[in-house]
Structure formats: structure tokens, C-alpha cells
Image: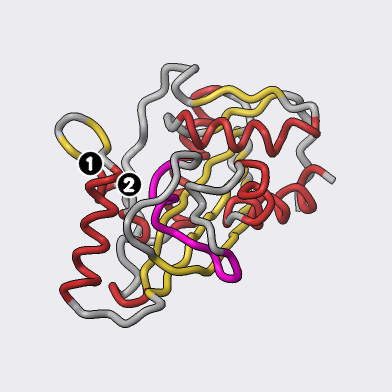
Amino acid sequence: MRKFDGDRLVIATHNAGKLREIAALLAPYGVTVSSAADHGLEEPAETEDNFAGNARIKAHFAAKATGLPALSDDSGLSVDALDGAPGVYTADWAETPNGRDFPMAMEKVWSLLEAKSVPEPRQAQFNCTLCLAWPDGHDEIFAGLVHGRIVWPMRGTQGFGFDPVFVPDGETETFGEMDPARKHGMSHRAVAFDKLVKGCFA
């Protein structure tokens, strides 16, 4: 496994919330992060049907365009009773002509569960797959998963995306209600990052 030995890393995202989370997780390692948006990069088309494939597309695109190592995160919510949907299309479910509307997307998930009369607990997982890519084409992949359930109504304003309707197993608060430091310690992104750090930064 290749070690990261630089001090600059491009985070292949245009999502400010995701950038904040990743910057906080990498802060102890003296890495200066910038986003794809900071470099004026467009978002490449995510044409794969799995998290790892889409993570690779984004990381290699950013690494090639900037000449710097790049880290991408392809993540999403998979709901058991919806055959794993929205899955890799999690962000797409929130798309509107005026930008992403996650409350609308969360309502869509809940409405589909209601229409199918799915019994409680309405089980789901947050998935996070990280790809660390170098300009020479090498990459390393790390996956994280956290199990939980979908609740309604939406609760909390601390997180982003589908956080306000997801309660991780063993907890009573949604990711949207949790103190961010506590969420960072147990989230799907934290699990994947723990693997990344042990593999490439430790």
C-alpha cells in the first residue's frame, strides 16, 4: 500500500459540508486541503453503478487536472426495503432545477417506505468509499459502513444530506442532531477514514 508523503491534497468535491468534515479528519496529519471547486474544476460524470467506481472517477480526474494527489468520497444512503436505493444515486434524488433539495429527497424516501408499509425499524446503511489517487494513476480504495434506521420527521440541523432522518444502531439521536465531533467518531466516513489513515498516513 502506498503511503501519502506530501503536504497538499485536493479533495475532489464541490460539497462544502463534506470538505469541512474531511479537513477536520485530516487536520492532525499536517495536510493542507483544497477542494475541486477551489481549483475551478468541473464535476466529472459519475458513470459507474457502484461507490468505488465513482470514487475512482472523481479522484483521478482531480489528480490529473491539478498534478496533486486527490481524495474523493463517494457516499450514499442505502435503504434495505428500497432494494438499496437511493445508493449511488443519493445526491441525484435531491437534484432540482434550483440545486439540491435534501428535505425533498428525505420526504421521497419516507413516502416510498410508507407506500410499501415497511415495518419498523426501517433499516438502512450509510456507505462511504474513499479513493486516494496520485497523478501517476495509482490509487488506494477504502470503504466504510454504518448501519441504522430511517426515522420521521427530520430531526436536527448539525449534519447535511440525509443526516436528519438516519439514527445509527445503538443511538437515539439522528446524525443531524448529534454533536459533530461525536458523529465524526462513528460515521461511515470515520470508518473509511480510519482505514485510510492506517493505510496511507500512519
Label 1 and label 2: CA atoms lie apart by 7 Å
- Choose between 147 and 70: the one closer to the eye: 147
> Alpha-carbon neighbours of circle 1 within 10 Å: few (<14), some, or many (≥20)?
some
Query: Is residue 161 on the magenta stretch?
Result: yes
Image quadrant in which you'd find residue 22: top right
Q: Dot 1 corresponds to which residue? A: 95
Taking 17 as reference, is 1 above or below it? below
Which residue lies at the image location 59% right of the left edge and 60% below the top edge?
144
Q: Position of residue 74 (x, y in %)?
A: 47, 49
Segment colored magenta = 160-171
Residues at badges 1 and 2 in contact (C-beta under 8 Å)? yes
Secondary structure type for disc 1: strand
What amino acid is labelled 1 in the image? Glu
Q: Is residue 180 left or right of residue 81?
A: right
Q: Position of residue 44 (x, y in %)?
A: 36, 36
Q: Position of residue 195 (x, y in %)?
A: 72, 56
Closer-to-camera residue (30/180): 180
